[in-house]
Image (tube, grey):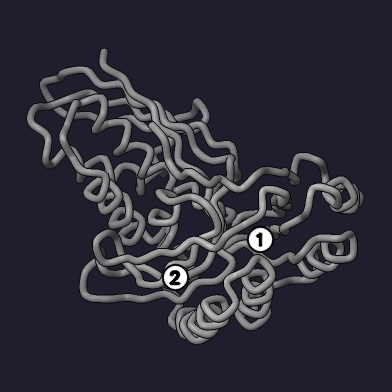
Amino acid sequence: MPEATAFVPAHISGFFQPCYLKTPERTGSRNGGLCLDLGVFTKVRVKPADRTKVKISIDGKRAPEAKTTMSAVRQLLSVASGSFEIEVDHYCQVPVGAGYGASGAGALGAVLALSKALKLRASLKKLVGMAHVAEVTCGTGLGDVGAQILGGLVTGLQPGAPPYGRWRRIPVSQDFRVICATLSPLFTKKFLHDSGFRRRASKLGGLALENVVKRPTIEGFMLASREFAEGLGLLDGKLRTLIQTAEEAGAVGASQIMIGRAIFAFVSTNKLEAVRHAFSEILEPSSIFVTNINRKGKFC
């Protein structure tokens, strides 16, 4: 039974400007965010069959709700010859539904691994486009996949899949770590279908990107992300407490993960334990994790 694996990093958005255009390939967001060393590992197993059947699991449990992965896989199968029984197993190192880009990572990992298992000659741009279209049409995201290919701290300057999207990295010192604290999921699809939310995000996201382009540093990114979060109106008392706690303990900056009830902070290594300890006095240890910035993007 042919099999293949892929890893795609988690991606956190600090701000975003939704851009709904004529096609899902051109639709997306102008945004700013970072890729993490943690993410989603995907294993795909394939065997010939009389009729194509796709089974998806997440962390060992059947996942019929993984519609973004299914959509991406169906797109790839439409250009493959033959029928197959396909098993897609995702292993998530980050919370699902909390703004870590797990849907995009799973979809991209699935088509990367499946293309390899079937020995297809699909280009990377084509596979990225399939994952992006799946995210957009399923309502699980707008701008994660392009950044997940690059890695690093990334600004999305133009929306859409390749060749329409355009991205740029912001340099980050090796001394920095990212600490995340997750309270609970927020449902991306609900917000992306809310016209009032989209209008606010469009106005605030455009301003945030403009400010980061003028000041392409960690400090500039964190300030723009914080101003975006404050204006968007999703911050609650617990999130505000966590942000304040992180900054008082020495973080360079902290803000809300978009779109999730979670926060992230950039911390220098000499302040890391202080910030982690401060969080541990508020949250259970299982809600907190520390990671490096992923600087390479996907691998398979």
Along the line of sight, which residue is nearer the eye, 160 or 285? 160
Residue closest to the eye, 153 or 22: 153
User: What secondary structure is marked by label 1?
Assistant: strand
| Residue 141 percent across, percent down from the top left | 42, 60
Taking the spot 51% from the left edge, 31% from the top edge, the residue there is: 91
Q: Residue at x 69, y 58 (%)?
A: 264
Tell me, yes or no, if residue 283 can be seen here: no
- What's under tag 1, amino acid-wise? Arg
Q: Which mark is residue 85?
A: none
Which quarter of the figure has residue 291? top right
Between 201 and 176, the one lying in front of the other is 176
Identify the residue position indicated by label 1 in the image.
261
Left/right placement of residue 236 relative to residue 75 reads right
* Percent coordinates x, y for residue 10 in the rendering: 53, 47
Q: Is 7 situated left or right of 244 in this image?
A: left
Q: Position of residue 275 (x, y in %)?
A: 85, 53
Q: Is residue 82 left or right of residue 43?
A: left
Within 10 Å of the Cα at label 2, are there few (<14), some (14-19), or many (20+) other Cα atoms? some
Residue 133's place in the image compared with 50, above or below, is below
Q: Amino acid at mark 2?
A: Leu
Disc 2, SS: helix
**Residue occupied by mark 2:** 192
* Distance CA(mark 1)–CA(mark 2): 16 Å
Which is more toward the observer, 53 or 221?
A: 221
Q: Position of residue 152 (x, y in %)?
A: 53, 53
Q: Vertical placement of 171 versus 244: above or below?
A: above
Query: Image quadrant for the C terminus?
Result: top left
In contact (CB < 8 Å): disc 1 and disc 2: no
Q: Residue at x 16, y 18 (%)?
A: 48
Q: Quadrant of residue 292?
A: top right
Q: Earlier in the sequence, mark 1 or mark 2?
A: 2
